[in-house]
Image (cartoon, coloured by chain):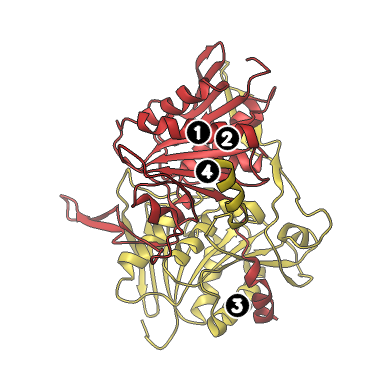
Chain colours: A red, B yellow
Amino acid sequence: MDNNRPLILISNDDGYHYNGIQSLIKVARTMGDVFVVAPATHQSGMASAITFVNPVRSIPVAREDGFTAYLTTGTPADCVKLALSQLMADRQPDLVLAGINHGYNHGLNTLYSGTMACAFEALMHGVPAVAFSYGNYSTDADTSVCEPIVEHVVKRVLRDGLPQGVCLNVNIPNEEVFKGMKVTTGDMGRWINEWEHRVDPSGHDYYWLTGDFEMGDKGEGITDYYWLKRGYVTVTPCHIDQTDFAAMSRISEMLS
Amino acid sequence: MDNNRPLILISNDDGYHYNGIQSLIKVARTMGDVFVVAPATHQSGMASAITFVNPVRSIPVAREDGFTAYLTTGTPADCVKLALSQLMADRQPDLVLAGINHGYNHGLNTLYSGTMACAFEALMHGVPAVAFSYGNYSTDADTSVCEPIVEHVVKRVLRDGLPQGVCLNVNIPNEEVFKGMKVTTGDMGRWINEWEHRVDPSGHDYYWLTGDFEMGDKGEGITDYYWLKRGYVTVTPCHIDQTDFAAMSRISEMLS
């Protein structure tokens, strides 16, 4: 590793062998030294789950000039925790990148996202972070169309930094050409039709998680999902504090 | 089920056979009809993880006057989703209760907590929710000391409701007598010493997740962890929107 180049930690939730993370690695290597710690298996929808019932192992898979990669048996949050506290203990990264996720992480879905968990974990350790998600859900989606967006955002973040305690959630629509880029709020819509009920050959019920996302933006034009549906790349600044400060006095009165 | 009594959904992350959820059930049954949908196995630290790689099954374990209980093979978030969209499709609950968790969920740990995931899931479905956590980490902790607190908070929430989009994160210290109750912010401290490195009998590395929580409150006396350490019950109002509104204009300038 060259100490004069930025050091960039990359993780994801789809696992190391997806095109999305390979696109991130490709772009990041043009701008700095790259250290990958990614799940060995698919960890989509794992949110900020952490592993303490079982131990976590790391498997080195690449070590060459300016590029190191490990797989782990843990969750996305475990990967970033293990990287920052153990595998990169000698030198903390200047930036953490997560993704590119195969599928959106817009609005309230940041709560379910293993990709966003990587960025939140970085924030907790005081490292700036950007998560990228692409609106193509195929396991073999070609993510090269996202690479100029990644390059633009990462260059600016390396140049200017990010406000303390803030990470970026970047969503990229599944389009040939983007209409532009919008800084947005997260869409607080809701999931409906969440389960598909089936009956197995033995006559027992089971349920598949599925659903349709109902947009919260009622024409205000402020949320990520509103602009993604119109072909724009969206960037939502996020933080980890979930305290609702505005409700504190009302709750105090109610409980007294 | 009696349609004139409140209908209360209860879930947790430790699983149905822990004392914490049994305390919640006991108190809730004095105030309403109770419907339990809880994980069949221990799901601590699962955050808002959701299951879509495998189907989810539900197992009915109790059905008597005013009390119904199911176990599921899913995560805490799956349990609440399955309850609200399928198992309770005929009548939505008036309130969702989660816990009592065996162990605190203070401050930034709301992001890792399966108990809080139940409350967040309820919020997404527009149902008021309260999560309870107890500072005793034993699997066989006696949670009866928490029951008067649960009764007080649940009575007030059933009487007054909660602000739209807000749930409560109640933490109860491991004390014989409580000093009082405080409405607080979540402590945005940090975890240090997060991993214990060991070597297995074959000479291979593995890591156990552990750690010490370093308080963020530097004497301001505003956070949950600050007051828990002083013997107070804490109540933190929480929401699910993680957008950092204050950073939006700065990020717009940076990316333009």
Q: Are marks 4 and 1 on the same chain?
A: yes
On the image, the x and y values in percent for residue B147 come to 62, 72
Residue nearest the viewer, comparing B119 with A137: A137
Chain to which the residue tagged by mark 4 belongs: A
Mark found first going from the N terminus, 4 or 1: 4
Q: Are marks 2 and 4 on the same chain?
A: yes
Badge nearest the viewer, 2 or 4 = 2
Q: Which residue is mark 1?
A: A152
Q: Tell me which amino acid carries mark 4.
A: Ala
Q: Tell me which amino acid carries mark 1.
A: His
Spatial distance from mark 2 to mark 1, Cα to Cα? 6 Å
Q: Are marks 2 and 1 on the same chain?
A: yes
Picture quadrant of residue A45: top left
Picture quadrant of residue B177: bottom right
Is disc 2 in contact with disc 1, using a CB cutoff of under 8 Å?
Answer: yes
Q: Which residue is mark 3?
A: B151
- Give residue A117's mark: 4
Is disc 2 in contact with disc 3, using a CB cutoff of under 8 Å?
Answer: no
Badge nearest the viewer, 4 or 1 = 1
A118 over A58 or under it: above or below? below
Horizontal relation, residue B255 to residue A181: left or right: right
Residue at screen point 66% across, 39% down: A125
Q: How many marks?
A: 4
Badge nearest the viewer, 1 or 3 = 1
Q: Residues within 10 Å of mark 3 (few under 14, many from 20)?
A: some
On the image, the x and y values in percent for residue A204 come to 21, 55
Q: Tell me which amino acid carries mark 3.
A: Glu
Badge nearest the viewer, 2 or 3 = 2
